[in-house]
Amino acid sequence: MSSNKSTSWSYTEAFASEDAVQARARERSFDLGITPVSPGVGAVLTVLAASSKSQAAVEIGSGAGVSGVCILRGLPSTAVFTTIDHDVEHLKAAREAFAEAGVPANRVRAIPGRAAAVLPRLTDGAYDFVLVDADKANALLYAEQGIRLLRRGGLLVVNDALDRDRVSNPAHREPTTVRLRELHRALRTDERLCASILPTGDGLIVAARL
């Protein structure tokens, strides 16, 4: 990354501000050994959720609730948010963050379990917003399920899509990097989608369901 690009990236990340609720959720993330979304990514998630006017959203990978709080703040007050994580401690921390953010418990479905097992049980075409923020090795599987879940006009968002700048460098052949390249090709050529990559954080794929 050139010095100018590095400066611009740092500036855009610092442009986003966080309140005490997000700061505490971020601290819990670190305590649990979780890498939360960056402030810049969180701000983009809020904007995307608000622009989607979603009534039903799904998050794959709850973390400690940083991303969930950001999404919920962009959703209409009537929207229902579903978050999936295999670790019950992560879900507990996420629910704590949502409660601190003033989100009524009946607006959140926190589902414990492996996403590969949970996602097929969710209804086709019933959601307007899907965030994939889980293990990169299965990102393509999660994205395929996410497309199935979306209504026309809905948004699929994949976090950490550039794998620390390795995806763009053919010399990197790590398994997760290769899998993310496969994901990029699949989304770029999928006729059901209009997709783009944002350089925010470690890269966000944003794809609209046509």
Image (cartoon, helix red, strand yellow):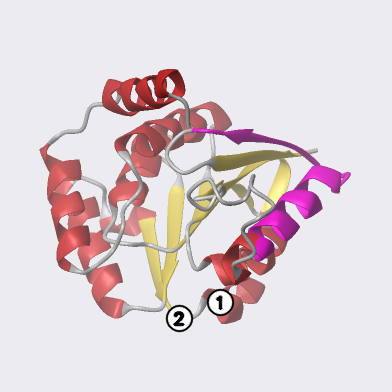
Dot 1 and dot 2 residues touching (CB under 8 Å) = yes
Residue 148: % across, % down: 74, 59
- Residue at 56%, 51% (x, y): give it: 166
Q: Residue at x 48, y 64 (%)?
A: 134
Q: Nearer the viewer, residue 46 or 203?
A: 203
> Does residue 148 appear in the picture of this structure?
no
Q: In the picture provided, is 207 more to the left or to the right than 33?
A: right
Residue 33, picture quadrant = bottom left
Question: What's the residue type where badge 1 is placed?
Answer: Val
Report whether 191 appears left or right of 207.
right
Secondary element type, mark 1:
helix
Instruction: Identify the residue at horizontal 14%, vertical 65% (top origin).
Output: 31
Q: On the image, numbered disc 1 is attached to which residue?
A: 118
Answer few, some or many: residues within 10 Å of disc 1's Cα (few below 14, many 20 plus, some between 14 and 19).
some
Mark 1 and mark 2: span between their CA atoms?
6 Å
Circle 2 residues within 10 Å: few <14, some 14–19, many ≥20: some
**Would you place residue 169 above or below residue 10 in this image?**
below
Along the line of sight, the residue nearer the viewer: 125 or 162: 162
The magenta stretch spans residue 183: yes
Identified at 67% across, 64% down, the residue is 179
Is 104 displayed left or right of 157 in the figure? Answer: left
Which segment is the magenta one? 178-199
User: If you read the primary sequence from the N terminus, does the residue marked by circle 1 or circle 2 appear first?
Assistant: 2
Question: Looking at the image, can residue 176 be seen?
Answer: yes
Q: Which residue is mark 2?
A: 113
Amino acid tagged 2: Gly
Q: Quadrant of residue 10?
A: top left
Q: Nearer the viewer, residue 170 or 163?
A: 170
